[in-house]
Image (cartoon, grey):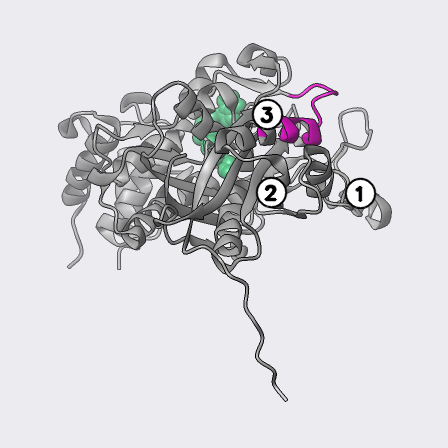
């Protein structure tokens, strides 16, 4: 017989309750990037807006950075670590494929036996994690969820590649998502365009070193094997980001029933100031909307960029708790995720 | 109805004005986008997409590199418009 199954009891809605970030101590100016590529500070600033980025040292592992960010997010949310029921970490730079980074973080932060897993959704990772967390809370399988974007992209950067060497940075950004009586996270407009999976990708798969034809592997000038790195078709990505992502952002606003005038803050993935400026123009965001431009001093930190930018806007008073913010992430896959949230 | 070269140049003038802030009348056939009109490689991507929409042509990334002058772009659009 089909017995009646008792479902979990969730909260009517979910919201971001707290945010925290960690930026590595070492600040890397454009001058340092210029040691390896033929470029200029002026070119880098004009094409990307980036002046400095943070690169992690040996002690600043993904786990250490995440624990710092998570601790701050937990405190900001006014909960204790043992209340966290699930840990979701988006990363593309965790080099230990198994076990997931999230299990170490759950254990060491004091989240006990919280469900813990990593996701790989590139620069859309924060929005993907947020969407999962909202689902868990509303469905009732977790009360509080830690969502993290953590990256050491400097480990995946080819310092001699002119189209990426100046772009990437390291860091971790975290939020606690929990129950709410009011809607505080709008519908997710998320998706993938796998036909464009080659436009941002790792140069060689890890098993290329084992089974691959050596002639296919990247070599440096001295003929030594190069560690895999991220490569991209810059113009193709730029075109996609500027035009397709403005449409996705608009859909997220429409789905949440928010007009540009109702918006306080815009936090797009921090890939490039030129992409951000173009989106602001296309979306016709009014003057009063605060726009995150954290990329100028943080570089592109993939999944970490949105929570890092969110934390800085709140910490510097440029945004405040209760503000309505449009967030959109996009990147390797290609994947994207946009939604409207109430800031913690 | 196919548009003329003159209409295309006028249209490109409005697009360049919108994206780079250059007066539309400065956009003349023999001007180079990057050297004369302050349109860098990324602004050029924006110009191209605006032109695609306006003139109903497809300009793939690989062809964008060949559009150095306003004449190059106008000729491309003339040749490829449906
Ligand atoms: C990377 C990016 C800044 C490169 O800019 P671009 O305009 O596309 O660069 P191109 O490769 O087309 O090169 C344009 C010109 O700049 C030069 N150039 C390229 N890289 C350069 C560098 N690092 N320094 C100086 N000049 C450079 C080229 O030689 C070329 O010069 P030319 O016209 O005289 O031949 C840009 O494509 C970009 O930001 N794209 C989006 C990337 C992104 O955000 N990815 C992550 C998404 S999650």
What is the spatial separation of the Cα atoms under label 2 and label 1, in whole angstroms?
48 Å
Farthest residue to the top: give it. A31
Q: Residue at x 41, y 42 (%)?
A: A328
Q: Residue at x 13, y 28 (%)?
A: B25
Q: Which of the labelled discs sits on residue B31, or is there none?
A: none
Q: Is residue A50 left or right of residue A26?
A: left
What is the spatial separation of the Cα atoms under label 3 and label 2, in whole angstroms?
37 Å
- Which residue, given by chain and number where applicable, does mark 3 sit on? A165
Q: Secondary structure at mark 3?
A: loop
Between tags 3 and 1, which lies in front?
3
Residue A174 coordinates in the image, percent (x, y) = 55, 34
- Which residue, given by chain and number where applicable, does mark 1 sit on? A215
Q: Which residues are magenta?
A: A56-69
Q: Using a 10 Å C-alpha cutoff, classify the residue at mark 3 as few (fewer than 14 neighbours), some (14 to 19) or many (20 or more).
A: many
What is the spatial separation of the Cα atoms under label 3 and label 1, in whole angstroms?
24 Å
Chain letter for mark 1: A
- Which residue, given by chain and number where applicable, does mark 2 sit on? A84
Q: Which of the two residues, A319 or B1, is positioned nearer the viewer here?
A: A319
Q: Is residue A15 left or right of residue B20?
A: right
Q: Is residue A64 magenta?
A: yes
Pick whichever of labels 3 and 2 is earlier in the sequence.
2
Q: Which of the two residues, B43 or A254, is positioned nearer the viewer here?
A: A254
């Amino acid at each position: 017989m089909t017995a009646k199954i008792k479902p979990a009891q969730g909260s009517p809605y979910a919201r971001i309750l707290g945010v925290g970030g960690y930026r590595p101590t070492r600040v890397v100016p454009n001058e340092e990037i210029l040691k390896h590529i033929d470029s200029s500070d002026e070119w880098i600033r004009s094409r990307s807006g980036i002046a400095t980025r943070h690169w992690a040292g040996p002690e600043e592992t993904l786990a250490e950075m995440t624990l710092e960010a998570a601790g701050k997010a937990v405190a900001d949310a006014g909960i204790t670590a043992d209340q966290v029921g699930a840990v979701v970490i988006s990363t593309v730079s965790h080099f230990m494929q198994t076990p997931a980074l999230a299990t170490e973080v759950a254990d060491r932060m004091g989240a006990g036996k919280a469900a813990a897993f990593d996701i790989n959704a590139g620069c859309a990772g924060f929005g993907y994690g947020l969407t999962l967390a909202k689902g868990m809370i509303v469905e009732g399988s977790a009360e509080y969820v830690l969502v993290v974007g953590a990256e050491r992209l400097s480990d995946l950067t080819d310092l001699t590649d002119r189209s990426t060497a100046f772009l990437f940075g390291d860091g971790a950004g975290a939020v606690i998502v929990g129950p709410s009586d009011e809607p505080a996270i709008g519908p997710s407009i998320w998706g993938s365009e796998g036909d464009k999976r080659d436009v941002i990708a790792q140069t060689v798969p890890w098993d290329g070193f084992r089974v691959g034809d050596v002639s296919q592997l990247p070599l440096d000038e001295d003929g030594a094997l190069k560690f895999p790195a991220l490569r991209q078709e810059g113009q193709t990505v730029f075109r996609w980001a500027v035009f397709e992502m403005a449409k996705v952002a608009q859909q997220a606003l429409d789905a949440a029933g928010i007009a540009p005038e109702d918006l306080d803050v815009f936090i797009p993935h921090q890939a490039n100031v030129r992409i951000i400026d173009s989106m602001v123009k296309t979306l016709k965001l009014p003057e009063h909307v605060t726009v995150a431009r954290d990329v100028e001093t943080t570089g592109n930190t993939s999944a970490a960029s949105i929570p890092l930018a969110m934390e800085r806007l709140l910490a510097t008073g440029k945004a405040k708790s209760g503000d309505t913010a449009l967030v959109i992430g996009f990147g390797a896959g290609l994947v994207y995720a946009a939604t409207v949230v109430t800031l913690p | 109805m196919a548009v003329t070269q003159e209409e295309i140049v006028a249209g490109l003038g409005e697009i360049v004005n919108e994206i780079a802030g250059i007066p539309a009348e400065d956009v003349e056939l023999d001007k180079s986008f990057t050297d004369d009109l302050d349109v860098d490689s990324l602004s050029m991507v924006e110009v191209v997409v605006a032109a695609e929409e306006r003139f109903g042509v497809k300009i793939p990334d690989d062809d964008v590199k060949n559009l150095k002058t306003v004449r190059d772009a106008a000729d491309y659009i003339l040749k490829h418009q449906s």
